[in-house]
Image (spheres, rainbow, N blue to C red):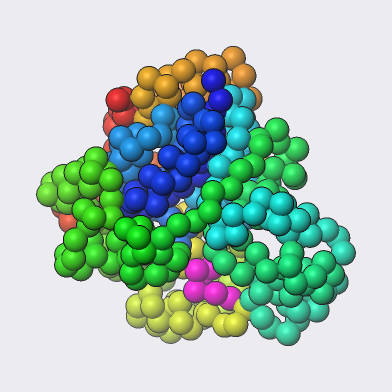
Amino acid sequence: MKTAGIVAEYNPFHNGHAHHIEETRQLGATHIVVVMGGHFMQRGEPAIATKWSRANAALSCGADLVVQLPLPWAMGTAETFAAGAVNILSALGAVDTLSFGSESGDISLLKSAAKAVLSPEIKEPLKSHLQKGIAFPLARQKAVSDIFGKEAASVLSTPNNILAVEYLKAIISQNSTLEPVTISRKGAGYHSLTAVEGIPSATMLRRVIKAKRGRLSPYMPRPAFEILKEEIKEKRAPALLEKIEPAILSHLRRLDIEDLATLPDISEGLEHRLYSAIRSTSTLKEIYDAVKTKRYAHSRIRRLVMSAYLGIRKEDLSGPPPYIWVIGMNQRGREILKKAKETATLPIVSSASQIAELDNRAKRIFALECRATDLFALSTPKPLPCGLEMTTPIIKL
């Protein structure tokens, strides 16, 4: 039994994701566990469909066990997102490798970049570049180039490479036994609006779904397509940010500067800039545009706004995820869990009654998850009821 971990959003599941799973199997994995984001994504928006339908698609297309990356980590920076996922995979104690996609496909170069980013030597040049007002990712890339050369810095310029470096950083920082392997990303680029060799970007598919124009079936494995088609038919998808925008704006207007200062990733007085934007605008786009600068990217502002709406605070990220929440499994997934019950260093849970037996921090994270699911339920074509986090059973294939 050789178990590989994959970290994903599957928003939605497409041919590129199926390729990743297939290639991971080719590298020797007999079992695959996926750590998947829930109802709100790292880009600061609701997922296109419920986490249960997305987990069902993953299990129907090659995954064996799907566990959730809890909300504060799923909505975090790339560093936070990666660290939370590595925490969970390591805590299972039953996962041998971490398989991730990258534009580079060169694990040695990615490891060099991760070690460079962790080096104290880049602190001063990083500080110097940040003082020029440029965004952190570019400042970091320049700092690595200054100290370690252009080759190590070259991989810090594309989305999947950057996330790959964050996974490697987390493995090093946590002293994890996970063996990292990378799969060369195939198909369209991360933000591309066209498909390449039948593999689209998730961005392209979301646009097609929202616009209700264009075909999905050529770009998705058949089971994933059928699951999404059924969700759309039953008006559980697509979930749209626009449907909850008035509620988000209403909530934001009730917050003061002190409230905003408690948000994750707030620094350098950014809460004042955000507060001013909230008080002087009337749409989310206007808020994003008003706060954005060369230093503060749109994605960071979207996450801050959504974190404020969902009630996520800095202190929620004060330690690793407090539990491992199981969303779905097949028979091989049951085998992973059987082994993990003997090796796991975090509680493995799948019901509110199990959460009730844990500490206050775990209860707090679960309460956030319940709230997020209830608010997500208002973004679907036909609003869903409250309480789904408490009542929806594990998916079993």
Q: Point out residue 110 in the picture as x, y percentages from the top left corner.
A: 68, 55
The relative height of residue 257 versus residue 116 in the rendered view (above or below) is below
- Quadrant of the image for the N terminus? top right
Tell me where the magenta segment starts and ends, as one range.
296-301
Asked whether residue 236 appears in the rendered view, the answer is no
Give the main secondary structure, helix, strand or loop, of the magenta stretch.
Answer: helix
The quarter of the displayed image where residue 191 is located: bottom left
Q: Nearer the viewer, residue 249 or 106?
A: 106
The quarter of the displayed image where residue 345 is located: top right
Relative horizontal placement of residue 87, taking residue 396 as reference (left or right): right
Report the number of numbered marks. Answer: 0
Q: Point out residue 394 in the picture as x, y percentages from the top left corner.
A: 33, 27
What's the residue at 66%, 37% (across, down)? 179
What's the residue at 30%, 61% (across, down)? 205
Q: Nearer the viewer, residue 279 or 99?
A: 99
- Quadrant of the image for the C terminus? top left
The relative height of residue 204 versus residue 333 in the rendered view (above or below) is below
Residue 297 is one of the magenta-drawn residues: yes
Q: Point out residue 173 in the picture as x, y percentages from the top left corner.
A: 75, 45
What's the residue at 31%, 25% (across, down)? 396
Asked whether residue 370 appears in the rendered view, the answer is yes
Residue 160 is one of the magenta-drawn residues: no
The relative height of residue 362 versus residue 195 in the rendered view (above or below) is above
Q: Point out residue 201 in the picture as x, y percentages from the top left corner.
A: 38, 61
What's the residue at 16%, 45% (across, down)? 230
Relative horizontal placement of residue 336, taking residue 78 as reference (left or right): left
